[in-house]
Image: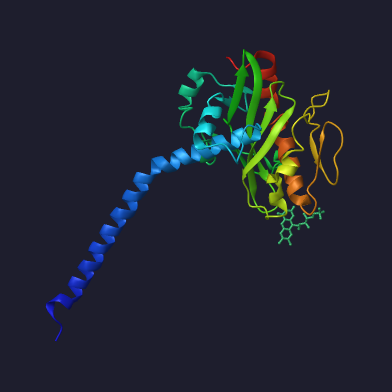
């Protein structure tokens, strides 16, 4: 005979209670950990920005060092379509809080991002944020560093990184990719320090304003060329494409020209 303890309704009740308790524990943990995850995400972003600017020492720098070094980087939001930095009033109108804004989270939001016409989608990313966040370092009133986010399709997926420029908006300080799906030992070599060491000092714009900076197959030469990665021509081409797109007229070229002419105040 089935005892009352083993009845179907009791079994279902126990299972139900277990589900409720587990879901409370899981969602409670997620809520409690959210601030820590957000802080880690920001720390990681800051580390990558410093890395692009050649200011991050992976062996030595603690989290505190990262935050201390990063404090000199001032964030600004640019309007790619208008080709300029947005004022605080404009940011308020757009309901952008610069402290919490994350451009990767608004990539599918039509208020902040847009589809790229296939004809012009050189970086093969399909959509772009209209208001990316750039970072600027000024020293004694002089522009020292400008860091811009870049992304573009490699072989297996989109590579995300930061490109750091000197204050002239024309000389490369460094390039750091923080997210990619490329193959370790092949395309993922874009993160190899020997390759990233090739970037500082390279020039971006030709005298006529066109983007001269290229990743070439084989060995690069002169002020504008970077060696392609051997065995990873497709990823190298992806990096070349993203440079052409983001440094070109559809990308940051107008903003960089504005910063060169009138600084970052507006
Ligand atoms: C499993 C596998 C993974 C690969 N991953 C990459 C990659 O991440 N990036 C890349 O450019 N090529 C990758 N390749 C190689 C490409 O298919 C292609 O051969 C290479 O880009 C050509 O470069 P090369 O002209 O310098 O030899 C991979 C190939 C295989 C078989």
x 87%, y 37%: residue:
221
Q: Is residue 126 visible?
A: no
x 22%, y 67%: residue:
14
Quadrant where ligand 1 appears: bottom right
Spot occupied by residue 47 in the image (x, y as percentages of width and height): 57, 37
Spot occupied by residue 26 in the image (x, y as percentages of width and height): 34, 54
Spot occupied by residue 41 in the image (x, y as percentages of width and height): 49, 40
Q: Can you tell which quarter of the image residue 10 is in?
A: bottom left
**Relative to 194, is 163 above or below?**
above
In the picture, which quadrant includes the N terminus? Answer: bottom left
Q: In the image, 86: left or right of 214?
A: left
x 69%, y 31%: residue:
250
Q: In the image, 219: left or right of 94?
A: right
Spot occupied by residue 16 in the image (x, y as percentages of width and height): 24, 64
Q: Is residue 212 visible?
A: yes
Figure disc tally: 0
Q: In the image, 229: left or right of 23?
A: right
**Relative to 133, is 266 above or below?**
above
Q: In the image, 134: left or right of 30?
A: right
Nearest the camera: 142 or 104? 142
Q: Can you tell which quarter of the image residue 69 is in?
A: top right
Colour mode of the rendering: rainbow
In the picture, which quadrant includes the C terminus? Answer: top right
Nearest the camera: 254 or 262? 262
Q: Farthest residue toward the front?
A: 60
Q: Farthest residue toward the bottom?
A: 1
x 53%, y 18%: residue:
87
**Relative to 11, is 95 above or below?**
above
């Amino acid at each position: 005979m089935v005892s009352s303890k083993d009845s179907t309704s009791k079994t279902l009740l126990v299972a139900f209670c277990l589900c409720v308790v587990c879901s409370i524990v899981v969602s409670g943990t997620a809520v409690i950990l959210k601030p820590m995850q957000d802080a880690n995400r920001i720390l990681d972003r800051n580390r990558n920005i410093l890395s692009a600017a050649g200011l991050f020492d992976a062996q030595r720098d603690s989290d505190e060092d990262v935050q201390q070094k990063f404090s000199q980087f001032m964030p600004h939001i640019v309007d790619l379509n208008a080709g300029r930095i947005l004022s605080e009033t404009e940011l308020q109108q757009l309901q952008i809080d610069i402290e919490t804004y994350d451009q990767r989270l608004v990539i599918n939001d039509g208020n902040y991002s847009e589809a790229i016409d296939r004809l012009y989608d050189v970086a093969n990313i399909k959509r772009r944020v209209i208001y990316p966040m750039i970072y600027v370092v000024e020293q004694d009133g002089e522009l020292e560093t400008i860091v811009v986010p870049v992304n573009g399709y490699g072989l297996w997926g989109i590579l995300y990184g930061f490109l750091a420029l000197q204050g002239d908006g024309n000389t490369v300080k460094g390039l750091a990719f923080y997210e990619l799906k490329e193959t370790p030992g092949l395309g993922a070599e874009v993160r190899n320090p020997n390759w990233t060491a090739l970037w500082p000092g390279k020039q971006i714009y030709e005298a006529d304003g066109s983007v001269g900076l290229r990743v070439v197959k084989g060995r690069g030469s002169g002020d504008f060329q970077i060696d392609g990665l051997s065995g990873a021509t497709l990823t190298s081409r992806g990096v070349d494409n993203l440079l052409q797109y983001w440094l070109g007229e559809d990308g940051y070229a107008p903003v960089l020209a504005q910063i060169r002419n009138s600084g970052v105040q507006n």
